[in-house]
Image: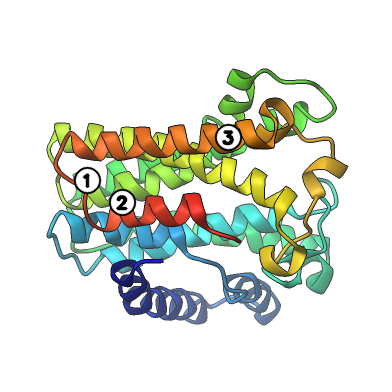
Amino acid sequence: MSNLLQSFIETNQPLIEQKMDLLIKELKVPSELKEAMAYSIQAGGKRIRPLYTLAVLEELNVQSEDAIVLASTIEMIHTYSLIHDDLPCMDDDDLRRGKPTNHVVFGEALAVLAGDALVTLAFGIIARLNRLTAEQKVQLIDQLSYAAGAEGMVGGQVLDMLGEGKHLTLSELEAVHVNKTGALLSFSILAGGIIANAPSEMMQALKNYAFHIGLAFQIQDDILDIEGTSEQLGKTAGKDALSEKNTYPSILTLDGAKVQLQNQYSLAIEALRTVGLHEGLLVEFANYITKRSN
């Protein structure tokens, strides 16, 4: 990780953690629900999605007091998806971010409700942001509902589930991951552009960058599931093969997946080059995503 990216993360990640903790602490809800919500939020994680929102704003030299709040809501939605993804009816995993999964600690019913509470809370918080225009808030809510819903993350999860035990083509696998992983990651990047009122050319470049880096993120995840350990990953290694999931290595071989990873990285950087952002935080994030070990 470069000094630039490390410094950026060390500055902003604590702010995201503090804001999420405060937003949950302020809720007037049963203590058991609050505890279950906080458990998964406080379990750690790289916070790539909220950091991406802040990185776009820094690249565009725009400051917004609402940005850290919006960034925190994106991580809440990501966390909700992990809680539900780990449930016995889904991936049935007992380990997440190196800790017992939410349903293992609190039971399935409360885990489901904690996830529900996080996703609905996120939309309400965005609606109540008071420094963005009404138009910006509607645009953010509209695009987030798309990214997190049936046409994005949820739809991708269904495609992933339906594909288990079947042999998908590469284009079918990409459709899974563009939605399941890429949609919320893309929103995180585009949200920075929306807050900054970026021109259409910049928004298109960010959209192209987000598409390719989202695929790169998933390809590297698939590679790490083979090459990483449970201790490194903070979740059960080798789970994809045991579940007969379609992955890039299963379709392209491990070496082929690594070639595809580099292709997606190159396309992401080229998208930035079209608007003069081929140096700086977004490039450093792309480097980190394609070379990370967890």
Residue 109 image point, x, y percent: 80, 61
- Relative to 32, 215 lies left or right: left
The circle on residue 177 is 3
The answer to the question of whether label 2 and label 1 lie on touching residues, with beta carbons closer than 8 A, is yes
Task: Please tell me which residue is depicted at 48% across the width and 61% down the height of the picture.
Answer: 75
Instruction: Tell which circle, 2 or 1, labels the residue nearer the N-terminal end.
Output: 1
What crowding class fits label 3: few (fewer than 14 Cα within 10 Å), some (14-19), or many (20 or more)? many
- Residue type at mark 2 is Val
Q: In this view, does 13 lie above or below 86?
A: below
How many labels sit on residues? 3
Report the amino acid beneath label 1.
Answer: His
Q: Is residue 233 above or below residue 99?
A: above
On the picture, is 240 further left or further right than 282?
A: right
Residue at the extreme front of the image, as rendered: 255
Q: Is residue 6 left or right of residue 48?
A: left
Q: In this view, does 17 lie above or below 265?
A: below
Density class for disc 1 (Cα within 10 Å; few <14, some 14-19, many ≥20) is some
Residue under numbered circle 2: 283
Query: Looking at this view, is 58 or 114 the one in front?
Result: 58
Location of the N terminus by quadrant is bottom left
